[in-house]
Every structure is written in C-alpha cells, then in structure tokens.
C-alpha cells in the first residue's frame, strides 16, 4: 500500500479555513492524504464557529490547534495549499521545491455559524477534489 501524501494547508491565522481544510482532507481522503495546517501569524485558538461547523458535519475536532508555519518548514510535503491571498503572498521558501496550489476561501472569522457552514461546504466542494487531482489520487466510490 502506498503511504499517504503529505499536504500542508496554509492561511494567515490558522484558526478557521485551514483548520476546516485539514479536518476535511484527513476525513474525505483518509488513507490517501495526511493533511496538516499552519498559519503565517497563528491565532491563540481555533475559532468556535470552525469547531462547530466540523462537529455538525460529524468530523473530529480533537487535537485541532493553531500551529506556526515555522515549526513545519523542515518537514517534507507533497503539496502546499494556500487558502487565503495573504498566505499566498507571504508563503515562505521551503528547503526543497514543493508543488503548490492556491485556492482562496472567504474568511468567516467573527461571523455567524452559517458563514462557517458555507465555507466548510465550499472547502469540501472545491478543495478536496483539487487536492485529489493535484496529487493524482483515485476517487473512491
């Protein structure tokens, strides 16, 4: 069996979009992808709306916490995904070339739960298939 591909999802604060993307990728592409997320300027905690949106979709939230990109720079990744324009602009140079994908999403931080639900569903609809395609993974029935 092929080991899972390693994906890093970046955004500014690592409190909303990238956290939801990490959980969705790890769930929807389980066994094929191992996703981690990080932020350029991590917030103190994951947004309550992001946790609730994941919980309502039946996704695990245990262990989700904002991580500083600097702590992950030396790890090998098969793909780096930026989910906000700020992270794309500030994306660092990795020690070795890494394929990248930029797919921005609305930032629901500070908005009502409905906004988090829309962003969660948008990430699932657009990011999961884009990562699958970028890594050449087969779709499971």
Image (cartoon, rainbow, N blue to C red):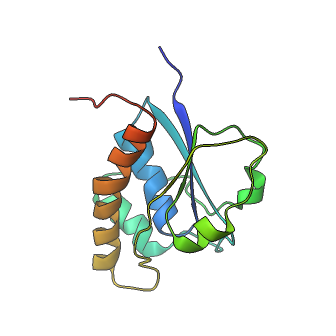
Answer with the quarter of the image where residue 26 lies. top left
Answer with the quarter of the image where residue 45 lies. bottom right
Q: Image height check: is 21 above or below 86?
A: above
Please give the name of the residue rendered at 32% of the width and 78% of the height, measured from the top-left corner: 115
Specify whether residue 13 is in view.
no
In this view, the residue in front, 48 or 121, is: 121
Report the quarter where the C terminus lies.
top left
Specify whether residue 115 is in view.
yes
Q: Could you tell whether 87 is left or right of 29 in the image?
A: right
Callout count? 0
The x, y position of residue 76, in whole percent, is 69, 37
Please give the name of the residue rendered at 41% of the width and 78% of the height, measured from the top-left corner: 108
Residue most extreme to the top:
1
The x, y position of residue 85, in whole percent, is 53, 72
Answer with the quarter of the image where residue 70 lies. bottom right
The x, y position of residue 56, in whole percent, is 29, 61
Please give the name of the residue rendered at 51% of the width and 69% of the height, measured from the top-left corner: 84
Please give the name of the residue rendered at 30% of the width and 52% of the height, measured from the top-left corner: 58
């Amino acid at each position: 069996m092929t080991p899972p591909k390693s994906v890093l999802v970046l955004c500014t604060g690592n409190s909303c979009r990238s956290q939801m993307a990490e959980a969705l990728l790890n769930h929807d592409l389980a066994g094929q992808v191992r996703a981690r997320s990080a932020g350029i300027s991590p917030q103190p905690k994951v947004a309550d709306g992001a946790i609730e949106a994941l919980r309502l979709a039946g996704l695990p939230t245990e262990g989700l916490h904002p991580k500083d990109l600097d702590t992950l720079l030396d790890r090998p990744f098969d793909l780096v995904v930026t989910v906000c324009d700020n992270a794309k602009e500030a994306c660092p140079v990795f020690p070795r070339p890494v394929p990248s994908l930029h797919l921005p999403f609305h930032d629901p931080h500070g908005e009502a739960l409905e906004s988090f639900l829309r962003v969660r569903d948008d990430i699932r609809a657009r990011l999961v298939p884009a990562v699958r395609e970028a890594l050449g993974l087969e779709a499971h029935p």
